[in-house]
Amino acid sequence: MPRADSRLVRTGLPVVVAIVGILAGYLLSIGLSGYFVFLAVSAVTAAIAILGLGIVTGSAGMIALCQLTFAAVGAWVVSLLNVLEAPGGFVLWLLAGGAAAGGVGILVGLPALRLRGVNLAVVTLGFAAAADVTLVQIQFPGSKDGVPVMRPETFSSDRSYFFFSIIVLAVCGLVVYFLQRGRWGSSWKAVAFSERGTASVGQSVQAAKLTAFAVSAALGGISGGIIAGQVQLPFASSFTPIQSLALYVLAVMSGAYLIDMAIFGGFLWVLVPELLKRWGIPQDWGFVIFGALGVQALTSGTNLGQGIRNMWWRRDDARAAAAARARASSPAPASASTAATTSAAAPASRSAASGHALSVEHLTVEFGALKALDNVSLDVPAGSIMGLIGPNGAGKSTFVDAISGFLPNAGGTVRLDGVSLGRMSPTRRARLGLRRTFQQDRVPPSLTIDAYVRFVARRRVSSAEVAEVLEHFGCPPARTRLAGVDVGTRRLVEVAANVLARPAVLLLDEPAAGLSRAEHLALGERLGTVPGRFGTTIVLIEHDLDLVRTVCSTLTVLDFGKVLASGPQDEVLADRAVIKAYMGETEML
Amino acid sequence: MKRHLIGTAVLTAAALMLSGCAGDATGEGSPIVVGSVNTKSGPATFPEASLAAAAVFDAYNKAGGLDGRTIDYRSLDDKGDPASASAAARELVGSDEAVAMVGSASLIECEINAPYYEQEQILSIPGVGVDTGCFDTPNISPANVGPFNDMTLTLYHGSEVLGLDDICVLLEIAGSTRPTYQAAIDRWTEITGKKPLYIDDTVPYGASDYTPYIVKAKDAGCGALAVNPVEPDAIGQVKAAAAQGWDDVTWLYLTSVYSENFAAAVDDAGAGIYVPAEFYPFTDAESDINSEWRDLMNASDIPLTSFSQGGFLAAKYFIEVLEGIDGDITRESVTKALHDMKPIENPMVGTPYVFGTADTHADNTAGWPIKLTSGTNAWESDGEDWIVLPE
Amino acid sequence: MLQGALAGLAAGGLYAVLAVCLTLMSRLVRVVNFSQAATGMFGGFVAVWLVEEAGLPIWLGSMLGVLLAGVLAAVIGWIAATWLSEADTTTRSAMTVGPLLMLISLSFILFGNKPQPFSPIIAGPAFEVGGVVISQVTVATVSLAIVVAVAMRLVLTRTAVGTMLRALSERPTTAELLGIPSKPLSIAVWFVTGVISAIAIVIVAPSQSNDATSLSMLIVPAAAAALLGGFRRLDLAVVGGLLLGLLSGLVAQIDEVSLIRNFLPFLFIVVLLLWTQRKEVWDAAR
């Protein structure tokens, strides 16, 4: 029952907040003086633009220094449709402006598929500078003849236009809210943290980046469209690169991926100049202040919104953890024991299953002169757990990278359930049912466990399913934020989430690293039940021989990129070559 | 819980609103509110016009004002940004209830606010009109000549007085000015029967290096260049030509470059830089035509520029009209008085000023020829009288 | 046509100098400094103020201005080294957007937005080849770019400081363990590049538009040029700068494509990046 409540709250609350916001906007639109109404429209346009920046820079972690250029595109399209007297009126023009800006956003974002970080910042700044000069030259349609942009008929006065802009802001805020909490939002946050991690769960990195750019630019375009309706004769001077830089800094400073902070940022955008005016200080100080605050925010790595939320969450998480501990104290032993019984039964039943879930032939990977993998061939029987062991540098992680598609130049063939994977991208492989986890932490900390698990699962899962799998792997409850849990637990969540995806084959790269000895064994027992319950074949890379012995029915030993031995567990462990090359070292563990 | 900050924001907005709404009572004996919208911050600014107007009004108030009623002059910054320009006009006209706008100087304000002024039935006398809206709308009539008539003047002066051939026109186009400049060039053709050798309207605003455009003009065989740049660009152009060793080019510029700063920055002026100054040259310290303006500016510590001349004149015109009003000073009475005013003569300009009821206001068609030659770093007068465009 | 292309070379030389500085910064202190041109601009403006208002001789004023630019850059470097020493390149670079905004606005406040009356240190045509005029500024900026690139290469490969710098950029932890003073060294890099960019800007500013915005935004073509060398190779950064200058000069001669001229640095960046990074499918670290 509490879960159903929270879902209702999750969808209902933002709508209620939006409605309250619109009502407040209406009251302000009749209560404020004419001047402040006009100023408030500027705040709203800035808020929408910052909302967009929040997606591309805040969530997706890409630096975009051309937000107002997207706004200019929106304003330009609105002016053009106005001059052409296109049917549909302002609202439709506004949408068209947003769509056009979104299209331009995708074009500008295309380089982002290959470019990262600061290179992208350079590209977007270059674009902003070029577009600015061009805009000064070509001007907005209608400005030659002074054709003013027609506002929507029912919102033609300044007051009602402000109310209109508030409605647009509320709608944009709602759309962003649900996007952020949906698949797209998760993919943006995932891609910001790790591109490999994103691809490995079947999410196209390209799609994540381009949707971020498109949505962000579309919001910019809508903001520009509203400016066009506000001033009625838009000028290039509203959209200069310097202002884009200031807006970027403001977005970073306020923490614009949070909707309320984006609105607060828009408010600051007009408040600072207004205060300067009132105190008789030259307006140029405004950008000095923004610049200083931006440096402060970037050097401290925090922002206003996140700071406030962190305080709130810490209290929240502490309470949740206390509750979880109280609950865990009684039922935990019971579930552990059931896990133990099923796992004991599992290995035997699985060896009877027919066919190979994964078969690898002549897999070869060369890094220059070094052969990291040399003609590796092995088969993993469906429904089994295979252990992949070997000393450090034997090529285990390279093997996982190659199988999961991160080394496109690998030679040999890999078949998943008999289907050759050829040169498929990691994303395609993941979607076909080949999943992997990473040795390094690739779990985006900006998500909640629930959002992350659903993102990784790539299928519709009920809250009950999520809760069950989390409990099975001993993870914290779903509403916990990943930022608040330790790395070992994050890796557990990663395993749990990938299991819930029900892949055909799951490659686990040292999942137990960072866990205590007792947790190792618990994990082993839990993994043992996975093939039976989820129909997933597991390849487990592990140093801990005890764990491998208890869980794996078959073993493969790698040494210097070559298969030393492969087969049923007891045969392999008895192999002389294996003992000679490997056992001496593992005794030490 | 998530958006408690919105609450804070709304509260602050409300507080601001209250502070903005307070006061502004009008009535007998209360100050007459006069406003202006100016570009004071950002990459291109015109602060002097409203400063000069403010100085004029200050002096007027000190001298007793209009039968004891003082003028409350408010000048706001529009940052060259349309939204700020609109907001400023709404604050002055809507909230502060200004009776007129006087001495404004902005890159964009006229075009942006012209419809609003019409709607509010308020008139504006900019000190420096820049964009087309200052010259082709009914409610705005600037005190200066403006870049378009100035372009015709500089071409006319170049071809008819200096006897130059092969004049090329380089245009920096911003906003909707291209057709208006074309009309200005056509007017010159109409008067003199001459045509520019070529027109290059691709010259960018605020470029860092103008060498390629200068080289293009040189290759095309231009003997003189008529250009409409803002001051920084003009410096770039003259220097680019000097760096190319093009020392026989004559520059026909507009009043926008007429400053001591520009003269100080230019050492090599080719065959000379000629400008039809919109007002009587301020660099001529001997003449007493400018003495009232000069004394006031010096006393108020305002830079001596043509912009401050424009602001000064706008305020002077306004006071003269104001004093002719019988009865209450309201927006209606001021508007009516400006509509019915008789032309005002002033030796600082070559054509008398009149607002009137015309639909456009570009009647100021005289400039005083000045020149800047290589090595002097100072502007000097280049004639004895105004150049006036023939009708 | 040729004349037009060569006319762009003066700007190209300036792009090249700035690109070399950007490349050095990127290699040695892991940052793309967006305020690279802005600190130079600010130093230049201060130099003009010292000469015009304080009455200092030109050489002294210029020197003080250039030094101030170096100090400003060093302050930004100190911020980066103190609070962002562990941060990635992107965050460090994003931080420099703040100083860029501040310096432009501050120069509006302090010096106004009028172009500054820079007294030319060098001016006029240098020589003429077949009717093609090469200005002295062109000669100066192009040679400055080459000299700086060569000198920096020599410093990096032949001197003890260079070895330490390279160690610092390539193996920061090992360098720390060896006792190489990382913070002072990286601040010194900021200082030196700040000084070099300021010198270039002081040389060029008298001969072109020199308001705060257009000087500061020189960072865009400079970054485009530096990208030719992938922010790693000094020689390609120089070539990139000169090439970009030549190209923009050429395009300006053709009215039909004048709009493209604005987009030239942008297109240059995109095409180059897509080409140089075509094999980098996966981010090395993430």
Image (cartoon, rainbow, N blue to C red):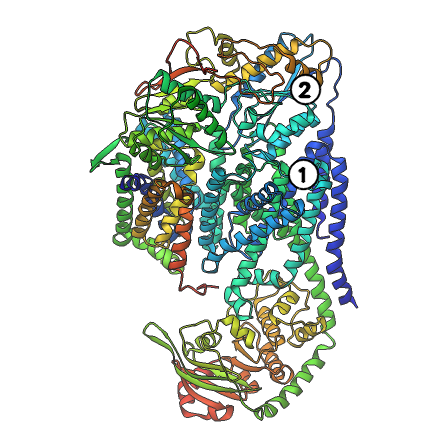
Rendered view: B215 above or below A400? above
Q: Which mark is residue A371?
A: none
Question: Residue at label 2?
Answer: B99
Q: x%, y% of residue B171?
A: 42, 31
- Residue C199: x %, y % from top left: 33, 37
Q: Amino acid at mark 2?
A: Val
Give left or right: position of B273 versus B348: left
Q: Position of residue B355 (x, y in %)?
A: 60, 16
Q: Are marks 2 and 1 on the same chain?
A: no
Q: Characterize the local packing of mark 2: few (<14), some (14-19) or many (20 or more) Cα atoms within 10 angstroms.
A: many
Disc number lying in front (2 or 1): 2
Q: Can see residue C181?
A: no
Instruction: Name above or below for residue B239 compared with residue B309.
Output: below
Chain under label 1?
A: A
Closer-to-camera residue (C178/C144): C144
**Mark 2–mark 1 distance (CA, rounded to whole Å):** 25 Å
Under tag 1, what secondary structure? helix
Element carrying mark 2: loop
For residue A482, what is the image quadrant? bottom right
Q: Residue at x 63, y 47 (%)?
A: A94
The numbered mark 2 sits on a residue in which chain? B
Task: Spot the residue most to the left.
Answer: C130
- Horizontal relation, residue B6 to residue A573: left or right: right
Give x and y (percent) for residue A418. Answer: 51, 85
Q: Which residue is mark 1?
A: A40
Q: Quadrant of residue A75?
A: top right
Judge whether B184 appears above or below A99 on screen: above
Q: Nearer the viewer, residue A93 or A542?
A: A93
Residue furthest right in the image = A1
Is there any visible trace of residue A167 in the rendered image?
yes
